[in-house]
């Protein structure tokens, strides 16, 4: 077991964590990134990325994350292969975190970039066809289904918003919901139900995702929740939209969260209620959930952390200056 000290401790990787690390390292803060169970975040399980600025051609998600990681290391970030299992936020700054390895990490500032993961149905074919027709992000992948048949599974705001978004690319969008009414806001329901490109299948659940001869998604096997009758729906793409789960279990009772478990921050900033503690990326963002917005928040967290440290140093130095006089 060892103790690692830094001016900026970053928990979690992905676009937010790596971007925070790049800016912090360039500010000579010698940041440490504890990468967690999934170094690189959700983009490591995403294939084609076409909407990240700076790349004319499609790039692969894992490659993009490797490049961000390499850039952060190049400018001076220390990457730790560890997973944080507990944090002490009551007696800081500095703040302490304990890794699964038993190592202790101490940071004068703390940036939380633990992310969020899409909730999945957990049915056969779902994971096997990920990136081959099954997705959890229409904004990310809808462009690849231009002019094709697509389905959205869910009945809340996320599902309705995804279905409406997909009409920008497809004239044949089907919303599949397990009940006979939606849970989404009324204004969103009205837009969806009136939209000429969207049809709705009520009282249906997806039992399986099945591939065609080319290995990509071909159809969904559905079951009626009222009659038990089975049916199939041929689609080129299916978007699971039953919500996201932020990785905030570590911080329950220690940081303010909303009803869905996302960390609360001061509007327009990554600042939490604790001095020197920041949150960036999907762990605090249930609206946009994009790599580029996560990276931007990581940058903001590093810059705000740098300012916080400068203010602390100035406050510490002032009494010494007065004594010298």
Image (cartoon, rainbow, N blue to C red):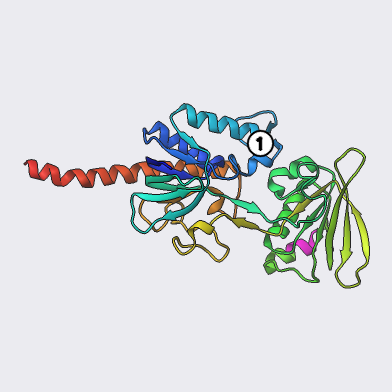
Q: Position of residue 184 (x, y in %)?
A: 69, 66
Quadrant of the rendered image containing residue 321: top left
Residue 131 placed where, x, y %?
Answer: 76, 42
| Count of all numbered marks drawn on residues in the image | 1
Q: Secondary structure at mark 1?
A: helix
Position of 318 relative to 164 (above/below): above
Q: Residues within 10 Å of mark 1 (few under 14, many from 20)?
A: many
Horizontally, is 305 left or right of 12 in the view? Answer: left
Q: Is residue 130 visible?
A: yes
66 horizontally vs 197: left or right? left
Residue at 42% from the left image edge and 37% from the top image edge: 31
Q: Quick check: is 84 in the magenta stretch?
A: no
Going by the picture, which residue comes out furthest to the top? 74
Residue drawn 84% across the image and 65% down it: 204
**Magenta-colored segment: predominant secondary structure:** helix
Q: Circle 1 sits on which residue?
A: 61
Figure check: 179 above or below 12: below
From the viewer's perspective, tell me whether residue 156 is left or right of residue 250: right
Q: Quadrant of residue 9?
A: top left
Q: Which residues are magenta?
A: 191-195
| In the foreground, 304 or 128 | 128
- Quarter of the image for the C terminus: give it: top left
Is 194 magenta? The answer is: yes
In percent of width and height, residue 27 lies at 37, 34
- Furthest residue toward left: 325
Work out which quarter of the rendered image holds the N terminus and state it: top left
**Residue 20, percent from left and from top:** 47, 40
For residue 202, say whether it is visible: no
């Amino acid at each position: 077991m060892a103790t690692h000290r830094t001016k900026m401790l970053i928990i979690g990787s992905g676009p937010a964590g790596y971007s925070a690390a790049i800016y912090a390292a360039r500010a000579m803060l010698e940041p440490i990134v504890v990468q967690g169970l999934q170094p690189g975040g959700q983009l490591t399980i995403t294939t084609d990325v076409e909407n990240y600025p700076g790349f004319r051609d499609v790039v692969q998600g894992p490659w993009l994350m490797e490049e961000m990681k390499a850039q952060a290391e190049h400018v001076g970030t220390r990457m730790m292969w560890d997973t944080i299992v507990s944090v002490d936020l009551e007696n800081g700054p500095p703040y302490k975190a304990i890794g699964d390895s038993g190592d202790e990490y101490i940071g004068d500032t703390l940036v939380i970039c633990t992310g969020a993961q899409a909730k999945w149905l957990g049915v056969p074919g779902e994971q096997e066809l990920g990136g081959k027709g099954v997705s959890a992000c229409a904004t990310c992948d809808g462009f690849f289904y231009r002019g094709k048949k697509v389905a959205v599974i869910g009945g809340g705001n996320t599902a309705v918003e995804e279905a409406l978004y997909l009409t920008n690319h497809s004239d044949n969008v089907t919303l599949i919901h397990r009940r006979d009414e939606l849970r989404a806001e009324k204004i969103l329901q009205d837009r969806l139900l009136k939209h000429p490109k969207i049809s709705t299948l009520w009282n249906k659940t997806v039992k399986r995702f099945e591939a065609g001869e080319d290995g990509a998604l071909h159809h969904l096997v559905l079951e009626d929740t009222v009659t038990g009758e089975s049916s199939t729906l041929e689609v080129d793409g299916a978007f699971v939209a039953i919500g996201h789960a932020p990785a905030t279990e570590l911080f329950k009772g220690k940081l303010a969260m909303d009803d869905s478990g996302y960390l609360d921050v001061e509007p327009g900033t990554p600042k939490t209620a604790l001095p020197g503690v920041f949150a960036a990326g999907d762990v605090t963002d249930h609206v946009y959930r994009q790599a580029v917005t996560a990276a931007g928040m990581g940058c903001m967290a590093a810059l705000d952390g740098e300012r916080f440290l400068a203010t602390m140093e100035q406050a510490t130095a002032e009494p010494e200056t007065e004594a010298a006089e």
